Amino acid sequence: MLNKLRIGPKLLLAPGMVLTLLLLLSAAAYYGMVRQNASLENMVQVRAARLKAAADVSGDARHAHANIYQLLAWINGSFAKNRLDALTADIGKKQAAIKSQLNALAAVSDPAERKLVDASARALEAYRKSVAETIELAQVDQSIATNSMQKAEKEFGVLNGHLAQLATLEKSLSEGAYAAAKAEFRTFGFTLAVLVLLSIAMSLLVTMLVRRAMLRDIRAISDVVAELAEGRLSAGIGSKGRDEIAETSRALDHTIANLNQTLRTVLTSVRSIDTASQEIATGNLDLSSRTEIQAGSLEETASAMEGLTLAVKENANNARMANELAASAANLAADGGKAVDRAVTTMERIKASSRKIVEIIGVIDGISFQTNILALNAAVEAARAGEQGRGFAVVAAEVRTLAQRSAAAAKEIKALIADSVAIIDGGSASVNEAGSSMGHIVASVRQVNEIIERISVASSQQAEGIAEVNNAVGQMDDMTQQNAALVEQAAAAAASLHEQTVTLAEAVAVFKIDDGGAGENADGNEFHHPGERRASSSPMRGGPPPSLGASPSVARRAT
């Protein structure tokens, strides 16, 4: 019942009960005073007046009876008539007054009183008749009046007896009214005392019930808040009242439920973040290893490209030299017709030059073969580099094509030079045919000149391609350096993230969640530090590197 009231009505309940009981007590006291007043009025205005009236009637009757004896004595003594008439009139007045008083008593009497009053009235009438006869007889004959007076005396005895009974009854009724008033006063006093005690008891009972109802909810809130301060979220109030304290209790229960849900969500997120940070750390270790391998491959590629650059430069120089030799051969062929005399000497020189050309062509052929191999290696490395090595693969393919073309040209030149050597060897035996063969030599030398020019152009293109390859390798080295730096940053970020998750998990572990999550958080949920997790992770190929920047190229870039 009290749980359905709000605080305002609860606080007003005890004072309201006191005021209500005070009003009831006031009404009861007023009713008792009214009853006492009625009893007092009955005693003073009714019982006392009737008792006095009964006493007055009895006294008047005795006085009137005494006056009759006095009248008889005066008649016997022959008193004056006027005095006798006056005394007779006084006796009549007293008897009339007695009758009037009896009539007044009969009008307001209860049955017992009325019975005595009626009997007294009848006795009074009989007495008056006897007295009247006695007075008349006394004026005629005194002896006869004496006999009549005896009858009147008997009638007076009856009247006096009824009046005495009436006085006794009135006295008894007055005493009964007084006793009833006293009993009613005692009853009212006892009833009022009982009502006062009941009012005090009910007021104290209501006050204690209100106090108990309010303090019970307040103590429950205090206990839950104390447990909440200690981190235990399993407690709940579950108040079913309707007052402000019950609303506060339900709001606190709702807050604890929301806090439980929030902490469960935070704990789940912390576990997910911890797992993700561990996976990131493992991935960073793998990426660091792959970056190491890529840095080593780039280092080897850079060294190979340096050797290829030197070979291409040497090839270009040889091509220029071959071009110069071809020009000299052309000049010699042009002057051959004029210097037939010196044909043998010239043929020997041509023979020597042809040997040099054969050697040069061999060198060019070797360079082309090496270029082809290097281009093949570059294509393999570009395939390993993936998307970043696509441009490098195109350049390597172009270089390989140029190397193949150079090899083909070198083979052709070698074949031509072999023919020239055969011709020169035959020229020694057929000097006479030198003139006719000189034209062929000039044409061959021109072809050699064109081929060497093509070799020179191809060498220039190879140099440009290798320069682009060098640039690509440099860019890949830079990107590898940047990747290494990013790997270091990612590793540091993963370690920081894991440390933050550990800190957050330790902060959440203070709370004991009501669905068993607290047990996991406090005991079963393990959040390892980054060093512990890395030590327990599986090793990669060749073992983890000593540092993310330990590769030679990265170290060289850093310096």
Image (tube, grey):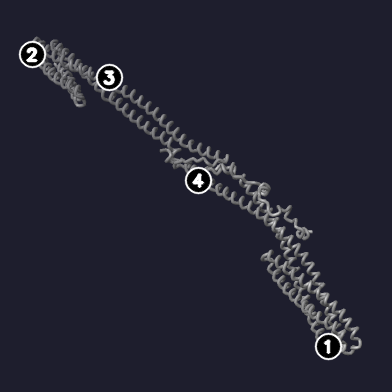
Q: Residues within 10 Å of mark 1 (few under 14, many from 20)?
A: some
CA gap, disc 2 to disc 3?
49 Å
| Amino acid, disc 3 | Glu
Labels 1 and 3 touching (C-beta < 8 A): no
Task: Return the mark for residue 18.
Answer: none
Figure quadrant of the N terminus: top left
Residue 557 position within the rendered picture, expressed as x and y whole percent measured from the top left? 77, 60
Element class at badge 1:
helix
Q: Nearer the viewer, mark 3 or mark 4?
A: 4
Closer to the chain start, of discs 3 and 4, is: 3
Q: Residues within 10 Å of mark 2 (few under 14, many from 20)?
A: few
Residue denoted by label 4: 254
Element class at badge 3:
helix
Closer to the chain start, of discs 2 and 4, is: 2
Residue 215, placed above or below residue 174? below
Element class at badge 4:
helix
Residue denoted by label 1: 437
Q: Is residue 13 left or right of residue 224?
A: left
CA gap, disc 2 to disc 4?
123 Å
Residue 328 position within the rendered picture, expressed as x and y whole percent measured from the top left? 86, 82
Closer to the chain start, of discs 2 and 3, is: 2
Q: Nearer the viewer, mark 2 or mark 3?
A: 3
> Is residue 315 visible in this depiction of the protein?
no
225 and 208: which is toward the camera = 225
Closer to the chain start, of discs 1 and 3, is: 3
